[in-house]
Amino acid sequence: MDVLIVGAGLSGIGAAYHLQARSPDHTYAILEGREALGGTWDLFRYPGIRSDSDMYTLGYRFRPWTEDKAIADGASILRYIRDTAREHGIDHHIRYRHRVVAAAWSSEDAVWSVTIERGADCEQVTMTCSFLFMCAGYYDYARGHAPDFAGAERFGGRIVHPQFWPDDLDHSGKRVVVIGSGATAVTLVPEMAKTAAHVTMLQRSPTYIVARPSQDAVGNWLRRYLPAKLAYALARGKNVTLGQFFYSQMRRYPGLAKRRLIGWVRDRLGPDYDVDRHFTPRYNPWDQRLCLVPDADLFEAISAGRASVVTDGIDRFTAGGIRLSSGEEIAADVVVTATGLELQLLGGMTLTVDGTPADPARSLAYKGMMLSDIPNLALSFGYTNASWTLKADLTAEYVCRLLNTMKARGVRQATPRVTDPDVRAEAFLDFTSGYVRRAAAILPKQGSKAPWRLHQNYWKDLLTLRFGSVDDGMEFSNPAPAAGRHAA
Ligand SMILES: Cc1cc2nc3c(=O)[nH]c(=O)nc-3n(C[C@H](O)[C@H](O)[C@H](O)COP(=O)(O)OP(=O)(O)OC[C@H]3O[C@@H](n4cnc5c(N)ncnc54)[C@H](O)[C@@H]3O)c2cc1C
């Protein structure tokens, strides 16, 4: 194959679309470790699973989102990805149960040899490609982050992790404790509270939570009067711009932003609620990802008494629930450990370049999508302050530009190289979240200057990636052998 795409999630299906549209003379296949496409949106099955960014920006640039709800449930997002794959004939290119475990680059042959575990017996097979496009997401599918809680083995109820939701769990009428305060916890709490006896969100420390309507009134209005593609493009532009504006204002004026965000929670929960304790984070807005609750569902569940928040440490599990650091005990029949993901890069595979192991953590990220000194490999890694797909789309477009340039110039190798001695290595993500700190050792670094700097800004990236030079920091080498030599 010219290109092997690893992963058939939102990014992998989008990457295939762009390849077909922009580099149609390149052959490709998608290798997918699981037996289904959709990635995140197929794996996660917990009650209420939904996006926390709007579908006008989480959707692909090339395929309008046409449903009323902009904050969409997991099943609708999965359907959208599946429909995209089917309508563009991408599904025929997917090889399921092909888990990539290693890739070795040979400059002599200008190919990646990719080692794959195929099928239920993990039979080892090898495929080769000229370019490897990693769309394997950013976390480990086999395990979630699960801290060891003392006494968990003595607990008489059920403990579940949202990444592995059991089909047979009926929580109606039960006392539920959800450990965590991130996007998953704030999704689960109001949803489970609809039928549970009571749901307690148990958090060590608070998160910024902001309520937003699940429907985008402007987006829906535009859809009523304009052709779908135009309405989508306008709503998408509006949401990217507003998102970027609010993000930059919050970073510039953190004190004001903090007061506003907490003020809105106070307005929802009333003057008697202890907002200082449960909804006032110790960090500034966007030091960690903001959590969105559609139609204020979390606050409504709390106001109605169906859910409550406890901010405390966990001392240990007991037979009947959880004992807190304060000595108090919460009775529980079901405990959900919404304690997060285990970050993983490149789908957990190992890399070698001309026989030498290559550690991505020692590389600088090039334009947030390639790695210094590692040829012909790109990875799709979305924004942390905006929808993932915005960057995934731009990355795929850029990869096509790169492939087309290589073909036009008759070279077989494109390697990002740091030639400027003044480029300093910095952390890849400037988040203080636990999962980002835990992953610092496996993530590449970003550089202090372009093209090694991560902008986390869609409009800047759009200019650079769609229209900017493909030569900056890129070494094109390894010309294709002349036809005569090749034949000989
Ligand atoms: C619960 C949840 C909610 C989220 N909500 C949002 C949101 O609202 N907005 C947002 O922007 N982002 C959100 N995200 C981030 C989300 O993961 C991305 O938006 C997006 O789904 C990522 O798509 P992806 O295709 O890059 O990765 P994934 O969806 O993770 O798909 C990766 C695919 O690669 C496959 N794969 C991995 N390793 C290998 C391997 N070695 N060999 C073969 N195949 C492999 C996997 O099986 C999977 O199918 C959310 C994440 C989670 C977990």
Image: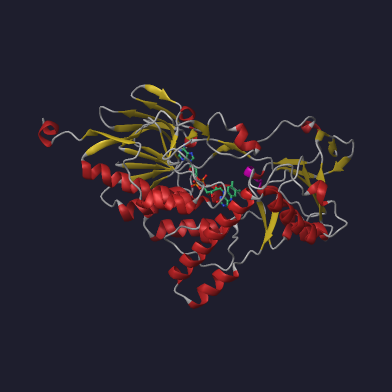
Magenta stretch in the rendered image: 163-167
Q: Quadrant of residue 431?
A: top right
Would you say 92 lies left or right of 237 here? left
Q: Nearer the viewer, residue 263 or 316?
A: 263
Q: Residue at x 55, y 28 (%)?
A: 441
Task: Look at 51% across and 73% down and name the residue there.
Answer: 223
State the image coordinates of residue 9 (x, y, percent, origin top left): 48, 48
- The residue closer to the viewer here, 437 or 248, is 248
Q: Is residue 378 magenta?
A: no
Q: Name the image colouring.
A: secondary structure
Give residue 233's position: percent from left, percent from top: 46, 65
Tell me the quadrant of the picture where the C terminus can be found: top left
Front-most of 473 and 185?
A: 473
Image quadrant in which you'd find residue 288? top right
> Could you say where residue 455 lies in the image, as x and y percent from the top left?
49, 45
Task: Classify 66 as above or below 20.
Answer: below
Q: Quadrant of the N terminus?
A: top left
How many labels, in total?
0
Residue at the location (43% across, 48% down)? Answer: 12
**Nearest the eye: 12 or 123:** 12
Q: Can the viewer see residue 294 in this picture?
A: yes
Rendered position, 81 above or below 142: below
Locate residue 14, reporting x and y percent.
42, 52
Residue 194 visible within the image: no
Q: Main secondary structure of the magenta part?
A: loop
Q: Residue furthest top?
A: 356
Q: Residue at x 62, y 48 (%)?
A: 251
Task: Say whether residue 218 is left or right of residue 153.
Answer: left
Location of residue 322 (image quadrant): top right
